Amino acid sequence: MRKLKGSFMIALALCLAFVTACGQSSGTTGGSSTPAEGDASTSPANGKESVKVGAILPYSGVYASLGENLTRGMELYFESVNWEAGGRKITLIKEDEENDPQGALRKLRKLVEKDNIDILTGPVSTAVAYALRDEVDSKKLPFLVSHAGGNDLTRTKRSDYIWRSSFSSWQIGNSMGKYAYDHIAKKIYVTAADYAFGKEVAGAFKEAFTAAGGEIVGEVYPPLGSNDYASYLTQIKGKKPEAVYAFFAGADAVRFVKQYEQYGLKGQIPLIGSGWLNAEDIRPEQGNSPEGIISTMFWDYHLDTPENKAFVTAYEKKYNARPSIESVEGYDAARVIVEALKSLDGDTSDRQKVSQAIGKVQFTSPRGPIKFDQETHHVIQTLYLIKTEVQNGKTENKVVETIGEIKDPGK
Amino acid sequence: MDIIAIQLVNGLSYGLLLFMITSGLSLIFGIMGVLNLAHGSLYMIGAYMALSITQHIAPNFIYALFLAPIFVAVISFLLEICLLRPTYKLGHLSQVLLTFGVAYILHDLVRLIWGANVKSLPLPPWLSGSVELFGQTFPLYRLLIMGFGLLLAAVMWYLQEKTRWGAIIRAGLSNREMVSGLGINIKIVFSVVFAIGGLLAGLGGVAAGPILGLYLGMEFEVLILALVILVVGGLGSITGTLLAGLIVGVVETFGKVMFPQLSLLIIFGLMALVLVVKPTGMLGKQVH
């Protein structure tokens, strides 16, 4: 019996270790580096060696689909320029971030020492981005952050070599604050997944909403990956707020939004939040429950611009699937790299110049015009108000308003 | 008062769902002494199979509710015969490691077959309604889960305590040689029990799918809760598992309301408390 109990404790420890690694798989694909263009590294254009771009992205575990969409976006853009910029071939070397800061750091060292990369891009996890930050800074490696949204990366942790083309949690939360007060409700309940990013988004929203004059009637932060939101929803309903602001993503967003309907809150208390609540890639799994959600995001599938239409058409033709927010991030990151290389005429010998060239890139992306803030190194972009509607029995998102350019304050 | 009552219903329905998921694990453990860490994976496969059945074979949740668990039962039957049988003489630790390894393999297989995106199992319209309860809206499906969970508990208790078949498997745990001496093939009994455990895991997966959603990693989240319930309830007791499931469900629900940041800690605190007061769990039997 004693032996049995020992085994039991080992079992529990094993599971906990697994779950605290955020439900990661064993990383079976870890360590594999797969150049996207098999021949590119050995057959340079114009006799010059190819530019090596290292991507640290999740290819296993809970965020695997984000990593895949980011990669698809990048490869789509690189393909559109024939994997060539400034007279040099581009090679993409992919490494699995495994949502593990220490593991990602090892991958970074491999990319720098063995593969000799010129530019780094990725990751999805903010914790991983923070872990890579010091190493990148000391090695003076140009690093284009293509997803991780933690505020500090372009605030206290900013570096000469790091630029971010995706978003910050502040931009996401802040963009809803004033609009919510002016057009939706004066008393709001705030709920967000209990981890750094969720807290930052909720914090930015609260700051902007209360500054406009609104009142927060309550807040609750369920653990990331909560199975059941029933008790929180009952509690929220009991407080009788005029609206609910929520940040949840992925499986959490699917469950939260569906249960919001099942517990009778939908239609009675307006649900607003960040665009991950009703994102393109999870809406089909939510049935009609996201109907009526109003969220803010920097891109939408139905954005009516020529750039976005061209992007969507090309993406759907190549992958036979709708692009997601992450696909756009990958597409834009690839374009930033290509434009920077063009402006340098393909000369990547001076890393400081490469970094500066990245910062000078500006263009009209599928999400609208983007450029970098020279002080914080963070992207300046337009945010949109998106509403989910039911059309022919299926939900679709619609851009109802352009909120305008939102620039992270950098402190 | 209404809020407390509705939270109690929330807790009880979640608890009965947890019982459904844990019952198979408890059965296998109680009867065979095997801690099957692939149980969560079988639960996950049940949910994903139900999704495929509703998408490709018949768009009917009820078919999935019957077919998917049978499919999972076949898988676990094969698992027992091919992998577990040779380990019975090696002791518990080897079974723990073996089944945990199987869980990893199944995790990757599920990703290979169904992909890494989040999925959800849609309910038919007549099941997705809601009812008024204590002045609050409550999903009908959750009430049905409660009823189903109680029914399952009653059936399992009856089979195990009151039938000849139950007597054989209980005897098989205490003294394997004696049962074999009575002319009963204990190997077949074990295989059947393991298959039933799989059936229950699959059933739990299908039942939980519409509520909890389908995603990679769901198996380990559920496995942790199931292990806690197993410890709290007492090893090898169906009644104990039911009781522990209800208590964990209710405690977690109220924990979430009162101390949202500590809900997982409260569950483990409960487990520690039970282990200190009663090392064999609330209704545990002494297993040799």
Image (cartoon, coloured by chain):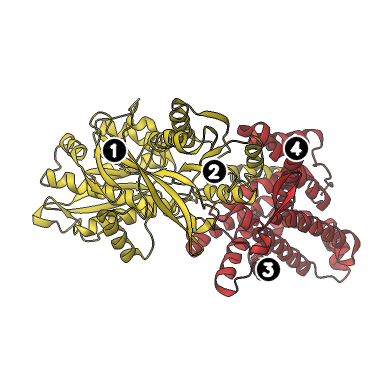
Task: Look at the numbered discs 2 and 1 and tell me whether their residues touch, using CB distance below 8 Å.
Answer: no
| Chain under numbered label 3 | B
Asked which quadrant contains residue A316, the reply is bottom left
Disc number placed over residue A379 in the picture, else none:
1
Q: Which chain is yellow?
A: A
Total numbered labels placed on residues in the image: 4
Q: Residue at x 60, y 33 (%)?
A: B261
- Residue position for label 4: B4
Q: Position of residue A125 (x, y in %)?
A: 42, 41
Disc number placed over residue A270 in the picture, else none:
2
Asked which quadrant contains residue B204, the reply is bottom right
Classify B4 as above or below B28.
above
- Residue position for label 3: B62
Task: Look at the numbered discs 3 and 4 and tell me whether their residues touch, using CB distance below 8 Å.
Answer: no
Classify A190 as above or below A395.
above
Q: Earlier in the sequence, mark 3 or mark 4?
A: 4
Identify which amino acid the numbered label 1 is placed on. Val
Identify which amino acid the numbered label 3 is placed on. Ile
Would you say A213 lies left or right of B89 here?
left
Select label 4 or label 2 by which is in front.
2
